[in-house]
Structure formats: C-alpha cells, structure tokens
Amino acid sequence: MTPPTQEDRVPAWRHHAFRIARAATTPLLPEDYVDLFNPLRSRTHLRGRVVALERETSDAMTVLIRPGRTWRDHRPGQYTRIGVDIDGVRMWRAYSITSGPRTDGCISITVKAITGGTVSTHLVRILRPGQVIQMEQADGEFVLPKVLPAKMLLLTGGSGITPVMGILRHAATDLDDVVLLHSAPRPEDVIFADELRDLAAGGHVRLLQRHTDTDGMLNPAELDALVPDWRDRETFACGPAGMLEALEAHWHEAGLVHQLHSERFRPALTEPGEGGTVYFTGLDRELECDGARPILDVAEDEGVIMPSGCRMGICYGCVLPLREGAVRDLRTGEVTTASPGDGVLIQTCISSAAGRCDLDL
Amino acid sequence: MTALQKKEHNPIAHLSDQDIERLGVELDAIRDQVISTRGSSDAAYIRRVIKVQRGLEMGSRAVLLASRWKPAFVVGTVGLSVSKILENMEIGHNVMHGQWDWMRDPKIHSTTWEWDNASPASLWKHSHNELHHTYTNVLGRDNDLGYGIMRVDEDQRWSPFYLGQPVWNFVNACFFEYGIAAYDLEIGKYFKGKKNKEIFQRDLKKVGVKIRQQMTKDYVVHPLLAAPTGSWKQTLLANYLSNLTRNLWTHSVIMCGHFPEGVETFTRKSIDGETRGEWYLRQMLGSANINGSRAMHIATGNLSYQIEHHLFPDLPSNRYQEIAPQIRDIFNRYGLTYTSGSLPRQVGSAWMKVIRLSLPNHLAAKFAPRPRKAAPVPLRFKTAAPKADAA
C-alpha cells in the first residue's frame, strides 16, 4: 500500500510554489525552517507531541500522542516505533498502540519500564507532556483478519496485553466469543486491570487471570483444563519470548500453527561477543570477523569493495548503517547495538564485530 | 619554515619513542574523557546554534525584502553575513566532520548534511576530512599547504609563478567558496593527468549543479521575492556582500590554521610507519590557534582551537575550549611550542609568509621573521639522548 505522493494530491500551483520554496531554501528544505515553529508539520520526518501521560501501574504509563500530519492511521494491534533523545543520543523502540477509536486523531502507547531498559524507563519516568518525539508509521501483522473469527483466544503476558488491548478497544463489541488468559507477576502489576474487569463484566470476554509470582508461569499443557476448546480458537499471543516459544512449540505439536498469531514485543537483545558474522544485506554475503580487527579490513581482505577514508576513525568516509547486531569501537571498547530498523551509522574502520551484525552495503 | 626533519634545531629531538607513545596515551585519555561525558547538553548546544542560525537567516532575509530602505539593507546584510558564517563554520564544517554523528539524528549527520557553499559536501569531505586531516602539513601530501597555487614553505620549490601569489591569495579570499570547490575537484591533478576522467566529470557535474542552486537562491529567487517592494537590486547586493564577507572571513580563519610562523611541516618520508603518538605530535606542531572572545571562537567554528580540532577532529566543537588547558599543559610538560596568537597577529603572520615566500628562498631569507620563542624543554628531557633522525 503506497501512500499518494505529493504530486498526486496537490494542485499544480502549489507544486510550483513548493519548487520556488525549495529553490529559496537550498541546500535545506522549506520544512527545516518550518521545524523552527512546528516540528509536527514535517513531510519527511514523522514526529508526535506528547499530549498527556496517565499512570497505569507503578511502572507502566500510557502516553497520549498527537502524531504529525503525515500519520496514516493504524490498524488495531499494530505498533509504532518511537524515538527519543536520551543523553543526547536518539534511541528507538517499538510500542503497541493501545488507544481505542478516537475523534481527535491522537493515539496512545502504553509503556512498562523494564529494568535496565533505557528507552522504556525514559518514557515512563522522564517524558513530559508537550515534548516532541520521533515516530514511524504504524506497522505489524498482529491484527484481526478481515473476517472476524467466531471464537478467539488471547494469550498475553505482562505488557503483552498492550496490542491486545488495542484490538479489544476497537473490536470487543463485534467479537462473539473471546477468552483472554492474561499473566502478570502480581495483581497490582496488571495493566488495564479495571478495564479488563469491565470487559468481563459486560460479557465481552471471558477473563482468566494468572499471577505468576504465586501460581507460576503458564504451562501450555494446562490449556486443556483452562480453555478446553483452545484447539477451535484463533489464537493471538503476545508476551515474553520464553512464553511465545513454549506456545509456538505447543501449537506446532498440535498441528495448529496456522491458528496462532504471535507478537514479540521485545526484540532479542544481542549479547555482545568477541567477533561474529557480518552480513552485508545488499551483497547478500556473510563474513566471519574476529573481534580484534576492523570490519573494514576484514571485508577488504575478502574482496568486498567498501567505502573507506582515513582508516583511523576521523574522516567518516567509511560509515555504513548497522541494521541489527553489535559492534565494538576498537579505540574505546564501547559497544554500539542496533535493533531491526535502527540503521545506526557506524565507522567500519575502527569497529569490530561484537556478535552477529547486519550492515547495509 | 622548513620541514621539521631538516631543521638545525629539531624541536622534537628531546623526545624518545617512549615519550611520544606516552604523549599519545595521554591524548587518548583526554579524548575518552570527553566522549564519556558527551550528552544532552552538547546535543542542546548544536541544536541551539542551528536554531539561532536558521532564525537569523529567515529574519535577515525577511528584513531584506524591504532593503530599498537603508536601515533594512544594513541590518539584513549584517544578519545574513553572520548567519552564513555560522552555517559554514560552527555548523557545516563540524557536522560534516562527524562531530555530531553520535546523536544518531539523521538531520544532523555527516552523511546527510549539505552546506551553503559552492563545494558539494561529498567532495569537501574527501579532500578535507580524508586528505588534509590525515596528511596534515606533510609536504607533497597535504594540498592545504598553499592549495596548489601558493608556496607557503621554504621546502616547496619556487617558480616565477609564485611571484604573483599575494594577488592569487587575495583573489582566492574574495571567491573562497569557489576556490574550495575547484580545490575539492582536484582540477590541478586532473590537468596533470593524474585524476580519472570519469570521476572528474562526475564531480564537475555535482559542482555545477551545486553552484547553480546556490546562485539561483542568492541571486535570483530572493531578489525576485523582494521585487514587489522595489528592493531587488539591494537584495542582490546584500546577498553578494554576505557571500563576500563570509569568503573573506573563512579564508582568514583557515589561513590562521596552518600558515602562521611557528607551525611545522613534515617531509613525505617522515610519516612512513607513523605511530598514533607520532600522528598526534604532527597535529600538535602542524596547527596554530587564535586567541579571542567567545563570539570569535564561535564565528570561527571553534577552528580558533585548531590544535585541539586537529588532535580530535570528531569531538564536538563546543568541547575544544574545555580541553584546551589540558592540551596546553601537555605541550608544556613535553617541551613543545603551543602556537597561538590574536586574530590580527595570526592573519598578519600568514599574509607575511605568503608575501615573503613569493620570492625565492635566498631573497625570502632576508625578510625572515625572528623565530617565536620556543617552549623551554623541561628538565627531565635535558639528559635524554637526542632522538635519532626522525626521517
């Protein structure tokens, strides 16, 4: 689905006006000047303004955001990537959109502060209304099918409730038979606890809650007792990686993988190691790099044509985007990591692989 | 000056290999200290400078719409000149060095930045970041030593062409941005047949497009916008004067970086197998600072801290001032001369050199300035055996 381009939408006179404005502002764009007054009007960089913050639990916060003018709306269950500047460095994470239907064009995300999670902690503890954040268009396949399933099972753990809440707020009244089995450590940790109880009381969902501090983690084998007809249900699961892996294995065993939709809400974190495989996405080529040599040297030795410059970390002529993985600065030992979509630009002449990494070349 | 390796009194003779390596370790430590404290206040600094510059530019251009009235002409021209200087120096030069890449903001990044200058960012980054900063002051390698049109070192061979170099230098100053574009194109190298023709033509096209865009903006679009008030002539003149002011200013600042008396040059062979410590040492001796006010430092893009900039070209420019005392202390402790002077003195010194070296060496020697006082060598080095010929 490609959005209509500017040229399709705007009348000819405006198109010419843009051209003049561009000629008047080159080498910048007119929007670089508009940014001084209203950063939400940018055509090339989607941003949002924090409208309000609402505490959900002691460590979870709902952030109400007014997206910039190029926002193309979302389908319930999708996520958006949020970028914030922390200690001056822009960091991105994906968060499910939790808001229900709204007429004011705002959306909300609900963030749980994770121990050691730089971005989530920032969003829950530091962010204030009025601040501008970076955003990307909504994305993700964790959405209801066009033809709504007759029977559904929602399996969630911790903040895995967030995309499911986004779905329920839009579609609870249209769905006939929904079982929601939600796990959280303690009752006070349940995000949206009141609203879930209301949904249950209104007969929209059958709510099963599990408190893992006392009851232990959900074992998929228990499903036969908890939701005897789980095999007949279209299942949507979102939660910690361990939980999802167990569920996927269970559904696989039952030969019902096609009925299971799962959403991982925390990317697998790279454990920085010494050296690793570097994958050049454009070349579709893998190289083994040791942890002591610059990626640039290793790649060139293997005949890869790399951009290069001073070879000592000063000229930035060798910079490539790191799509995923971790590299180590050979001068300082500092490790830079990237999650899918980050595209952190790294200097290959002074960076060694610190685990598997994908570089765009 | 003469290449350091050929000098009678080699200013680094008292340093042993271990001393130089220790110096490198000390400088690395300063670098690490800045990197580990780089954060939101630095990010706020560069965003503030960009905001001020863009606001000033918009405001000045708005005022120029009414420039047929003299006060508007004066205010607009001064504002636009300051904005153009800020844009090239404290913002453009430093962003393209990658000083702000750590913020991961694609809008303020060395790979995406384009500046208000005739030379396209990609060409400038190659000739400046890659060649000049790597081969600083190495005779025959660093073309910044005279830009290929001047002789600024006794060890550059004289020819009658150089008799005119005071004139070349002045013309270059007036049209400096085009000088930079021609320099980045490596026109000289091309005509000597040392530059690939396809690459040259590709680059030439880039420069052509860039110059056309710049000219259209300053000399067509903005004057046209001012036409309804009858101010097109004044606006055109204001744009020209702003570009001229910036050319003269940036040319002066850049001359002060490596041309004043006291700055050392190095022979081509001296950098064979150069260690990190030796590279640092070359940057220390090959650059000169300018003393002055905070406003002057910002207007030079902190290139007034040329020594600090050459040691750490990718550290945020707002930090050079902060580390300068530590760098000066290292110079003192290692018995090296920290070359620095006021703006008029350094500009004068650089011009003197350009004029003096337009003559062949035997005539130029008659006008040689008295050498600046060399730094005292600390006692601990006095007993050390002189270093074997560094060349």
Image: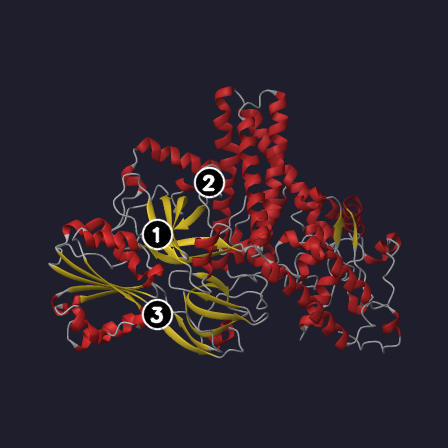
Label 1, label 3: how far apart the Cα atoms are: 26 Å
Image vertical order of residue B220 relative to residue B259, above or below: above
Looking at the rendered image, the quarter that the C terminus of chain B falls into is bottom right
Q: Earlier in the sequence, mark 1 or mark 3?
A: 1
Q: How many marks?
A: 3
Question: Is B106 displayed left or right of B141 in the figure?
Answer: left
Disc 1 vs disc 2: Cβ atoms closer than 8 Å?
no
* Residue A265, position as x, y percentages in the image: 33, 63
Badge 1 marks a residue whose secondary structure is strand
Q: Which residue is mark 3?
A: A213
Image vertical order of residue A315 relative to residue A329, above or below: above
Q: Earlier in the sequence, mark 1 or mark 2?
A: 2
* Residue B307, position as x, y percentages in the image: 71, 58
Label 2, label 3: how far apart the Cα atoms are: 48 Å
The answer to whether marks 1 and 2 sit on the same chain is yes
Q: Which residue is mark 2?
A: A35
Q: Earlier in the sequence, mark 2 or mark 3?
A: 2
Using the rendered image of the protein, determine whether residue B376 is visible from the camera's viewpoint. Answer: yes
Quadrant in the picture for residue B49: top right
Pick the residue in front: B317 or B146.
B317
Amino acid type, callout 3? Asp
Q: Which residue is mark 1?
A: A109
Badge 3 marks a residue whose secondary structure is helix
Amino acid type, callout 1? Ile
Q: Please state which of the two labelled residues, at mark 1 or mark 2, is closer to the viewer.
A: 1
The 10 Å Cα crowd at callout 2, few under 14, some 14 to 19, many 20 or more, is: few
* Residue B123, position as x, y percentages in the image: 54, 54
Question: Is B22 displayed left or right of B386 in the figure?
Answer: left
